Amino acid sequence: MRNDSESDEPAARAASTAVEDGSEPPSAAVSASKSESQSGPGSGSEPPADEDVSFGWEGVRTGFLTGIPIAIGVGGYGIAFGVLAAQAGLSVAEAALMSATVLAGASQIIAVELWADPIPIAAIVATTFAVNLRYSLMGAALQPWFRHLEPRQIYASLLVMADENWALTMRELKSGSGYGAFLLGSGIVLWLLWVGSTVVGVLAGDVVGEPAQYGFDFILAAVFVALAVELWDGASTLVPWLVALGTSVVAATVLPGRWYILIGGLAAAAVEVVRYDR
Amino acid sequence: MIGEPTVPGFLGGALSLDPVVVGVILAMTVVTVIAKVGGIWLIRHVELSERLEAGLDVLPGAIMIAVLAPELASGGPAEWGAAAVVVAVMWRTESILLALIAGVVGVVGFRALL
């Protein structure tokens, strides 16, 4: 929490202001990060963030506020999970506990779909790991910015990382705002809505019926499409994205589970490593 | 053993915590935490070349595409149409919330129509 405030350390800040205009007064921070991200696509190809990335309240707050719309969308997804958990026979407390501790939507939905009596423990735990292994890659992608943070700040943030706030955080950090605590802040609001909507979903299980009829099943895809539009950076993204598209579609038809996400991401990174000099 | 399947949320069972269920949830939590922190832990303990960092740099977008492509490919015209709506709204407004709402409304609408 050292580099907490933007205004109390003018000397330390002065140097960085020249590099990056991420140090507006707190009240303007939210709108500032928004307008920065609009200029992001044009400047996104420069080497990432060696400017200062700090971990403080301003980042938590910005992450929390920016995360609200996404978290509301995730709430719809959480209701869907709650409904499915209720149908699998989980109590309100059990479903809420799972949402509060696992906090990984896709794996939770798959887990309650595998749920039976007796519980297939090994299958559920193994599948959960396989489905969530993609988070290793997502976390690793944050390293260019997170290397400026302390280990406890990094690992605490990663605990509340889910697909949606990870994507939001990548957008934020690529815009150069330097909010190292953005993942934590957006994760907290996501966690609140995720756990809350799970409870609602379990309680409303009988009334709600089939989640797909409200389009809840499309929320994750919609979030990712929207953020992909923002991350689009013209020619430099074209090749890795095409590689990811091709390999993931093929892998999805050949392999079970969600291995295709890891394979698509790794294939794109591998191609970029090979192409590096050209 | 696992609550009352027929009466979800019935007040009597709402707060029940079956020890086996709690155990499974904790095991799921442990493997998920390992998955979440594992990648960055590894990278922080291994020296990276610029070449590797260039590869790391394309991961975010590539992962998003890798999540999306198979999901949309396995969908139908309704999902494709709704994805196009999200792209259009996002492009014009740069508002994730609007794009999200338009996408969900779109997918429900297209599913009803198509």
Image (cartoon, coloured by chain):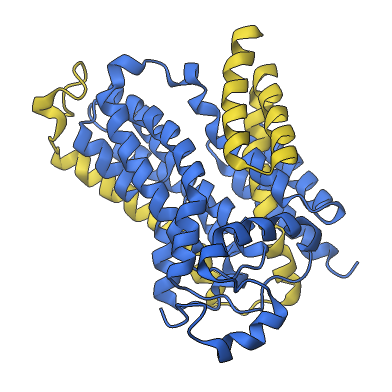
| Up/down of A156 relative to A195, above or below | below
Q: Would you identify the image quadrant in which residue A206 lies?
A: top left
Q: Position of residue A185 (x, y in %)?
A: 44, 59
Residue A52 seen from this side: yes
Name the residue rendered at 42%, 67% in the picture.
Answer: A155
**Count of numbered circles in the view:** 0
Q: Position of residue A171 (x, y in %)?
A: 63, 56
| Chain rendered blue | A
Q: Would you identify the image quadrant in which residue A251 lies?
A: top right
In-image side of B94 versus B12 (left or right): right
| Up/down of B29 relative to A216, above or below | below
Name the residue rendered at 32%, 42% in the picture.
Answer: A195
Q: Nearer the viewer, residue B1 or B100?
A: B100
Rendered hue of chain B is yellow
Q: Nearer the viewer, residue A218 or A57?
A: A57
User: Which image quadrant: the C terminus of chain A?
Assistant: bottom right
**Looking at this rendering, what residue extends furthest in the left direction?**
B12
User: Which image quadrant: the N terminus of chain A?
Assistant: bottom left
**Looking at this rendering, what residue extends furthest in the top direction?**
B113
Q: Nearer the viewer, residue A79 or A264?
A: A79
| Up/down of A120 relative to B105, above or below | below
Name the residue rendered at 66%, 88% in the picture.
Answer: A15
Q: Position of residue A89 (x, y in %)?
A: 24, 25
Residue A116 seen from this side: no
Name the residue rendered at 8%, 26% in the picture.
Answer: B12
**Looking at this rendering, what residue extends furthest in the bottom direction?**
A11
Q: Position of residue A118 (x, y in %)?
A: 22, 29
